[in-house]
Amino acid sequence: MPGAAGDLKYRRALVKLSGESLAGNRGFGIDPPAIEELTHDIRRVHGSGVSLGLVVGGGNIMRGTVASARGMDRVSADYMGMLATVINAMALQDMLEQSGVETRVMSAIRMEELAEPYIRRRALRHIEKGRVVIFAGGTGNPYFSTDTAAVLRAIEMEADVIMKATRVDGVYTADPETDPEASLIDEIGYLEVMTRELGVMDAAAISLCKENALPIVVLNIKRPGAILAALRGERIGTLVA
Ligand code: UDP
């Protein structure tokens, strides 16, 4: 069971991992050592007493918009993307369970041999019992993203915060991977993120956060301990609120 949660600012969190974070340096597919690295941090967060849900993307395997731009039917491509998130969820589950964390995968698309169907009340029950719930299958609908799925699940599980794990330290004034002038923003409002198109999450996801006053912390998954530090209220990454 998780430990004492006394020094935490946020006690229940939803962590959104991109599909790419499971791919390691190759940038596509599944790289078990990369996942193992991710699980160290998740295990520590869980061990500190935080109630934890995870949503993982599918971009390391399939992205609907990219495949449809190259000739595939958008809806078919989106369903393939949702299935990709199930593959990723199972990889995460395997590595987390190997490190001693009890988990459940709950899928928005029914496939009972592999994962429980997503039922909100059951998800809450798992979380209350100290299990890490990995929400797979996105929202279950085409034309959405796993960012939107993450916000939706965060609201449904009454999370205090959503942590968006990225490859950079937070939200920048421009793309830090291409623009050397880009500087890190400590804190910013939902509306400004939308109007300046800062690419934190898609507009549907941000507006859902805004309507429900759900804070987002954007942080670098490559920095060990970043998630736990942010949960303790340290100034890590960018706070969108
Ligand atoms: N997807 C979808 N509906 C959802 C969530 C995801 O159709 O509710 C599809 C969509 O095609 C998307 C793909 O699944 O491109 C993979 O998810 P995403 O691109 O959000 O993954 P990430 O960028 O986080 O790896």
Image (cartoon, rainbow, N blue to C red):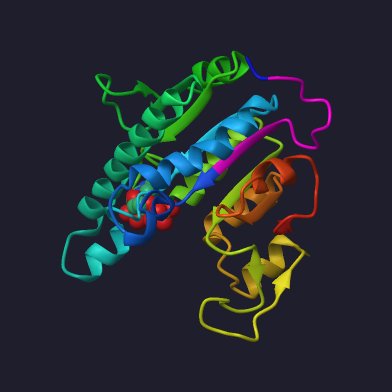
Q: Which residues are magenta?
A: 3-15
Q: Is residue 144 visible?
A: no
Q: Is residue 131 visible?
A: yes
- Indicate the quadrant containing the N terminus: top left, top right, bottom left or bottom right: top right
User: Residue 212 appears in which quarter of the rendering?
Assistant: top right
Q: Residue at x 62, y 16 (%)?
A: 128
Position above or below: 183 against 46: below
Report whether 205 appears left or right of 211. Answer: left
Position above or below: 200 against 172: above
Q: Nearer the viewer, residue 200 or 221?
A: 221
Q: Main secondary structure of the magenta part?
A: loop
Q: Residue furthest right?
A: 7
Q: Nearer the viewer, residue 143 or 154?
A: 154
Q: Nearer the viewer, residue 183 or 79?
A: 183
Q: Residue at x 64, y 33 (%)?
A: 45
Q: Residue at x 70, y 77 (%)?
A: 183
Q: Nearer the viewer, residue 75 or 224?
A: 224
Report whether 104 appears left or right of 30. Answer: right
- Indicate the quadrant containing the C terminus: top left, top right, bottom left or bottom right: bottom right
User: Residue 14 appears in which quarter of the rendering?
Assistant: top right
